[in-house]
Amino acid sequence: MVDVRTIAVIGAGAAGRELARISALAGYRTILDDLFPGSLDRARTGIRARMEEEVSAGRIAPADAEAALARLEYSDRVDEAAREADAIIEATADEMESLLEIFSLLDRVCRPNTVLIVTSRSLAVADLASMTYRAADIAGLRFSGTDGARKATVIRTAESAQPVLDAVSAIAARMAGEVEIILEAPEDRLLLRASDLR
């Protein structure tokens, strides 16, 4: 299994902020990356506010919240964040063109054996993986529910390597508790057209 200590979350929108928050709470050094500094500023403020809400509600101990906040870092350079990470979770728009651009960049800059995690709900993990030279290092991860009742689904493709699935499952277990692994069905894949790749 890949030893994951640092997770980079790409995209500081609402989903990325929440993924970064629960990653840091799960004990991972977490780098939240976004191209726009304003998004990172909003994310920093939003994550701190959410932690304070959780502490006030008694769902998180104050010391745990502070420790998680100390594990969070912010970056506006995806290449630098990617080079630091053992696993990368994309949390960007479900648009094929954007995701292909991101995964193409990650394919070039990540260290060997970096685990790449797709969170897209509308695009097939295998379609994105097939556009890289590291399809075996890619799996999907989707969360449902909320704190205290969060469930994670790990999506494996025909190419996903077992050490990658083990690493993603371990991440999911620390972030959610309940984990299931499913095989992505062939009918979930898109038929990519040349226009999708331009």
Image (cartoon, grey):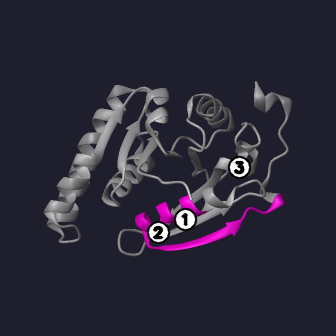
Q: Is residue 124 visible?
A: no
Q: Residue at x 49, y 35 (%)?
A: 82
Q: Residue 193: x and y, percent?
A: 85, 35
Amino acid type, residue under disc 2 in the picture? Ala
As for residue 194 lying within the magenta part, the answer is: no
State how many labels appear: 3
Q: Secondary structure at mark 1?
A: helix
Q: Which residue is mark 3?
A: 136
Amino acid type, residue under disc 1 in the picture? Ser
User: Crowdedness of circle 2 by 10 Å Cα count: few (<14), some, many (20+)?
Assistant: some
Which numbered circle lies on residue 173?
2
Q: Is residue 71 visible?
A: yes
In-image side of 120 versus 130 (left or right): left
Against 110, residue 69 (above or below) is below
Q: Secondary structure at mark 3?
A: helix
Q: Residue 133: x and y, percent?
A: 73, 37
Q: Which residue is mark 1?
A: 169
Give the position of the C terminus as an image quadrant.
top right
Amino acid type, residue under disc 3 in the picture? Ala
User: Crowdedness of circle 3 by 10 Å Cα count: few (<14), some, many (20+)?
Assistant: many
Marked residue nearer the N-terminal end (3 or 2): 3
Q: Residue at x 64, y 33 (%)?
A: 107
As for residue 167 lying within the magenta part, the answer is: yes
Which numbered circle lies on residue 34?
none
Marks 2,1: beta carbons within 8 A: yes
- In magenta, the rendered stretch is 166-186
Q: Residue 158: x and y, percent?
A: 78, 58
Marked residue nearer the N-terminal end (1 or 3): 3
**Residue 36's quadrant in the figure?**
top left
